[in-house]
């Protein structure tokens, strides 16, 4: 198990979009908590991304460009299945998202986040197009943020909890291990023997979001020389909110 505690780069701008996304996710999660179990199940069915519904939309008599076919590609990224789900996602976004937003600019980062989230859902659905299980959570969009971070800050240091130890890892190592873990679990989820152990997580949304994030980053980052990065030898590392 590896878990990021903080990273070394300090963004030069206030991460308006990252903070707004975190607040929006928290508000939606409290809305979920206010629903009864039947209402919550119905909401997840409507606003979560169901691959079988999306890819079978026309066969079910729906119009190809019906907006309701595409709405879950956005809304599913703001639904979460529990406290650990949302806290883990928002922590990752807080650690890595501010620097990516800093290098892209606020508007471009917002476009990037929405596209990465939608693409991650589509990739998850393309791998399992017959699934009727709703995919929810910001993990795919945040995987896109991690992919962009790898492109922009491969040499940054990530203070990491590795089991019971705290170590400083290069971002390329941390993110490489993270990606390989998602890829291995995604592959396992496709095999009957190991599928049960890997079920319940949209692994291919993580894999797809990461790869898409790397590509989108190249297109959307600002065309300017990177700011000098301050490392931990010159000033304390930046935490989640400082």
Image (cartoon, rainbow, N blue to C red):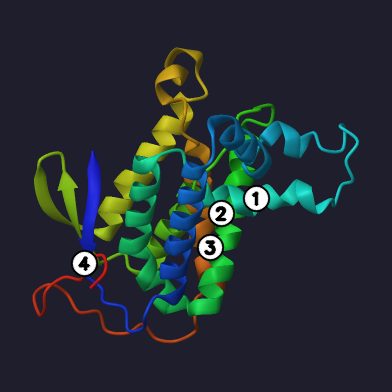
Q: Cβ–Cβ below 8 Å for labels 4 and 1? A: no
**Front position in the image: 109 or 228:** 109
- Tell me if residue 46 can be seen: yes
Please state, as top left, top right, bottom left or bottom right, where the N terminus lies in the image.
top left
Image-based side of 63 in relation to 17, left or right: right
The answer to whether mark 2 and mark 1 are in CB contact below 8 A is: yes
- Residue 141 at x, y percent in the picture: 50, 54
Q: Is the C-beta separation of discs 1 and 3 under 8 Å?
A: no
In the image, what residue occupies the spot 27% across and 84% down? 228
Residue to which mark 1 is pinned: 73
Residues at marks 2 and 3, CA–CA distance in whole angstroms: 6 Å
Quarter residue 142 falls in: bottom left
Quarter in which the C terminus is drawn: bottom left
Residue 87 at what x, y percent from top left?
Answer: 34, 49
> Which tag, 4 or 3, sits closer to the chain's start?
3
Mark 2 or 1 closer to N-term? 1
Q: Which residue is mark 4?
A: 239
């Amino acid at each position: 198990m590896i878990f990021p505690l903080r990273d070394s780069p300090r963004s030069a701008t206030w991460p308006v979009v990252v903070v707004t996304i975190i607040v929006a996710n928290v508000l939606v999660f409290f809305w979920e908590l206010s629903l009864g179990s039947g209402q919550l199940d119905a909401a997840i069915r409507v606003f979560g991304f169901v691959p079988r519904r999306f890819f079978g939309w026309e066969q079910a008599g729906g119009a190809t460009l019906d907006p309701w076919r595409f709405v879950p590609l956005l809304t599913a990224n703001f639904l979460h299945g529990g406290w650990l789900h949302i806290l883990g996602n928002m922590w990752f976004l807080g650690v890595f998202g501010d620097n990516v937003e800093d290098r892209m600019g606020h508007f471009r980062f917002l476009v990037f986040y929405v596209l990465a989230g939608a693409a991650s859902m589509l990739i998850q659905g393309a791998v399992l197009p017959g699934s009727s299980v709703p995919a929810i959570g910001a993990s795919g969009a945040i995987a896109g943020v991690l992919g962009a971070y790898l492109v922009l800050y491969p040499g940054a240091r990530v203070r990491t909890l590795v089991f019971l130890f705290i170590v400083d890892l290069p971002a390329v190592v941390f993110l490489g291990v993270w990606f390989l873990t998602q890829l291995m679990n995604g592959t396992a989820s496709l095999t009957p023997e190991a599928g049960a152990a890997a079920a319940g997580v949209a692994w291919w949304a993580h894999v797809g979001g990461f790869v898409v994030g790397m590509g989108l980053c190249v297109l959307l980052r600002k065309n300017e020389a990177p700011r000098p990065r301050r490392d931990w030898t010159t000033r304390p590392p930046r935490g989640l909110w400082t």
